[in-house]
Amino acid sequence: MTIDATRGVPDVSGHFGRFGGRFAPEALMAALDELTTAYDTAMRDPGFRAELDHLLATYAGRPSLLTEAKRFGEHAGGVRVLLKREDLNHTGSHKINNVLGQALLTKRMGKTRVIAETGAGQHGVATATAAALLGLDCTVYMGEVDTVRQALNVARMRMLGAEVVPVTTGSRTLKDACNEAFRDWVSTVDDTHYCIGSTMGPHPFPMMVRDFQRIIGVEARAQTLELTGRLPDAVVACVGGGSNAMGAFHAFVPDTDVRLYGFEAGGGGVGSGKHAATLVGGSVGVIHGMRTYLLQDDDGQTLETHSVSAGLDYPGVGPEHSWLHDTGRATYQAVTDAEAMDAFALLCRTEGIIPAIESAHALAGTLKIGPELGEGATVVVCLSGRGDKDMHTAAEWFGLVAEDGDAL
Amino acid sequence: MSDVREASAVSDPGPGGRSEPVAQGDDVREASRGAATAFEKARSEGRGTLVGYLPAGFPSYEGAIAAATTMVEAGCDIIEVGLPYTDPLMDGPTIQDAVHQALTGGIHVADVFRTVEAVAATGVPTLVMTYWNPVDRYGVDAFARDLASAGGSGLITPDLTPEEAGPWLAASDAHSLDRIFLVALSSTDERLAAITDLCRGFVYAASLMGVTGARSAVDTGAARLVERTRNAMSPGASLPIGLGLGVSDGTQAAEVAGFADGVIVGSAFIRRLLDAPSPEEGLDAVRRLTAELAEGVRR
């Protein structure tokens, strides 16, 4: 197993074409330089990679399975659907891949504390888990709105010993949690590492998180070849900040015959204005330390986003996705809340797998593009997380419980 | 487009009654309008420069102009007009509250330029402090052009580092605007040299590792940062150093003026306005604080 990075992009200053870079307070520049150096050194150190590979194999549960979803595929125009089972990882999502890498780096840099932002709580739980494992202090910032809709994950993080800080500024969701984490980091950078959870933020985060996540695509590529004898026709993932998608795509980027599809949160529909589909409905600007597509108004103020999925409820997107979008290498489309929830239910009923609502966007996308790809085509779908955390939302959406929480 | 501004700057010798410093070369506009003139004047009076910050649109469009005007009348040498932004990740709760109030009140970038115009009419150099995205969205050159047209002196850019500043360096040159980058306690000597090399007007030294907001004491590392910044400048450079973050009263202002060229105060003014029972009492409190700080920089 390898996490070797084949780096065509970014350049040394962290630019993917015109995207990425570092739009950060001067106070953080020294820490970003330190991190870049520590990361480069670590990736060239066989000892670091062996330690990470060992944790991924014996703790996170890698390699994750590739499961063929035959009954689901019948609903997607008869394509052959191969689910990359990141939901089976320890902590229930792909987030652990990145967090173990960054937590080991934190120790290497001699820091004793990690902070994180979280939307759905999956990255927060993964960070709290790695912190517990490696003996690091941990503070997680979470929008107040998300602490309510993902209350179970708040309890999980606290059980793991993390401090969870509900963020009450702005829209009280993921972007505001990011703001608050940056504010913490500016004050604590001497002993604290900001463990960013997606392929976003100032350089080197988009590159580093991608490299830690590219194991998804590396495994899926080999597993698909072994299973089918050839590369898939398409790779599909949901895109919020974009780390599971970047992880799934990256190993396939040079395989130009493999189509890459990212599905963003369309909320109530892109036309309604209530969505989080950054690449489909946004414009280029600067947010959270990077140049990328974002949802903004004419004055450059960040727009509020809307999605049934807390993990995709973010107005920006990783800069490498902006680059893949501009170059046309990947195709990005929006999936509405309703389409995602229908796909959520369909996977439950056809395969006995409850997906995260985030991942359900990728499933809904598969139902859309399947007929275009044609019967018999092979599609790898990144099932980035499991849906245990979403049962409250699903129960409300589908009317599975009465108002007082009792079974109907 | 510069005629009006030049004329007004030349005709107004400033409150100190001194004539403006002689412009060097043919760059008359820069010398007459830039923040450096205020530092020059204070230095000639043997005191520190007082820089006051307030977001446009807070507590209201008119209220911000009234407060800034009061700050000038009571002794601020330079005004920083904040451009309210939805994601102020360098700001603490006080400025977040003010900015939220300004945005909720419907403030737009065009209103910020009008605010600058009104404040600059008082005769002091008026800068805009802004996160980068609103400038990027407006168009860097167009923003510089319209800021200059409004009589603004330049920009303070807390999340724009020299590495990403290419378009702004060109636009600020084209429109003769000050460009004030920040230095931090964590900046290496190499970065201090590179940053001060690009600054025009002054360099903003962040006195502590943290977000904006009043503090009870000035960080002990602040004086050392000012010293390191001065030492990092190329020989012969006379770029003034303003120190900000955490300064809230006359005693702290006096302490900072002892080692820095200028004292930058923001959250303490906003606190006065947030806490005031009425707009009039808010302005009175701002006037008293300004007088206290102005006395501090003269100790």
Image (tube, rainbow, N blue to C red):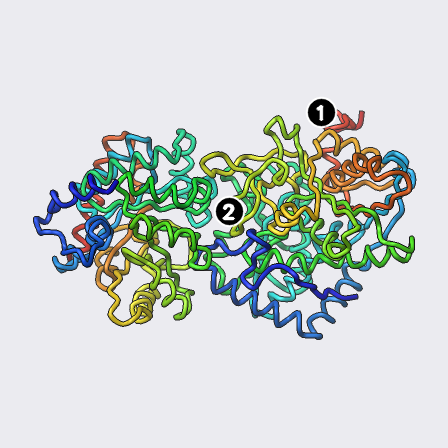
Residue situated in front as seen by the camera: A15 or A60: A15
Q: Quadrant of residue A212?
A: bottom right
Whole-number angstrom distance, CA of label 2 to CA of label 1: 42 Å
Residue B266 position, x and y percent, is 31, 47
Q: Estimate how packed mark 1 is, as few (under 14), some (14 to 19) or many (20 or more) residues with alpha carbons within 10 Å.
A: few
> Which quadrant does the N terminus of chain A fall into?
bottom right
> Which quadrant does the C terminus of chain A fall into?
top right
Q: Do discs 2 and 1 share a chain?
A: yes
Q: Quadrant of residue A64?
A: bottom right
Residue A274 position, x and y percent, is 60, 30
Seen in the image, is B31 located left or right of residue A221? left
Amino acid on which disc 2 is placed: Val
Evaluate whether residue A83 shows in this view. yes
- Location of mark 1 (residue): A403
Residue A48 position, x and y percent, is 69, 71
Q: Estimate how packed mark 2 is, as few (under 14), some (14 to 19) or many (20 or more) residues with alpha carbons within 10 Å.
A: many
The mark tally for this picture is: 2
Residue B83 position, x and y percent, is 37, 41
Seen in the image, is A152 located left or right of residue A109? right
Seen in the image, is B279 located left or right of residue A385? left
Number of the label disc, if any, that sits on residue A286: 2
Q: Secondary structure at mark 1?
A: loop
Amino acid on which disc 1 is placed: Glu
Q: Chain of mark 1?
A: A
Q: Residue furthest left?
A: B17
The answer to whether residue A284 is above or below residue B48 is above
